[in-house]
Image (spheres, rainbow, N blue to C red):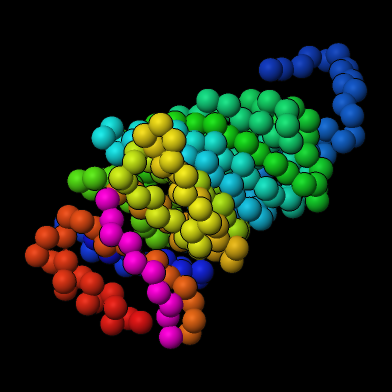
Amino acid sequence: MSLRLGAFVHRRFIVPGALGAASLMLAIPASAAAHSPGAPGIGDPYYPAYGNGGYDVSHYDLRLKYQPATDRLEGTATILARTTEDLSRFNLDFLLDVGEVRVNGAKASFTTSGEQELEITPKKPLDKGSPLTVVVRYSGVPSSKQAFGFTSWHRTPDGGIAANEPEAAAWWFPSNDHPLDKATYDVSVQVPDGTQAISNGTLQSTSSRLGWTRWNWRSDQPQATYLATLAVGKFDLTTGTTEGGIPVVNAYSRDLGANDGAARASVERTG
């Protein structure tokens, strides 16, 4: 497998009740009555269940730990957004098992529905135009999940890759999973020593401790969720720049065998 990523996304894979007559009056605060659930879809006429309504995401901060031997992923996602309507609750698109959700620092209730809907009810209703910080702690085995009859997580002999269009994020992080809602990313992935974790943007740093190495990536150009990439495996990494001066990282699987030379030549021809 070969994977190319730059400040903009460059990637290439080569992979071996009822009431009677009585009158009833209810005292409901005006603010609570005005809030309603966000739509479970962003409004796409072709993919009505994709994405969600009621908010706009600006940034995802993902801190992950992945064990290739078992395909187990653990993570904490911090999502920065702003509401676009008065919300009593809202949805994220996600498939793995959720342990806890916090909204603006307070613990929130949550449930799941449909193919990939994570329904979140904050402790207090959210006013239109309010800043929104959502923290989701989760874990699971991505390759065991399907939605709409397919999977976007692909196991390899030494790891896994998230790749699909127009949806791929729900297998590895909670999101507003539709190309209309673009955001920036910080992706920090802990993997066993000797294994590489590749994502979008630029590699900020790596650090090793107790048999694990953490790879810290940053993408400061807003991008669609399906373009957010995670590839874990044993790679040979090279760096360079495109003819336009964009820095790139080329990641070549060590499992390419006789195809290694052709794979490298193919990637290098793209400049």
Which residue shows up at 42% across the image and 80% down it?
242
Residue 78 horizontal/vertical position (percent): 61, 42
Left or right placement of residue 124 versus residue 54 in this view:
right
Whether residue 10 is situated above or below residue 165 in the rendered picture: below
Q: Nearer the viewer, residue 251 or 82?
A: 251
Which residue is at a point 87% across and 36% down the rendered structure image?
31
Residue nearest the observer in this picture, 90 or 173: 173
Residue numbers of the magenta segment = 234-243
Query: Which residue is at the front of the view, 58 or 21?
Result: 58
Q: Is residue 236 magenta?
A: yes
* Percent x, y of residue 171: 41, 43
Residue 262 spot, x, y in % from top left: 16, 73
| Overall secondary structure of the magenta section | strand
The quadrant in which the N terminus is found is bottom left
Q: Is residue 45 above or below residue 141?
A: below
Residue drawn 32% across and 46% down? 195
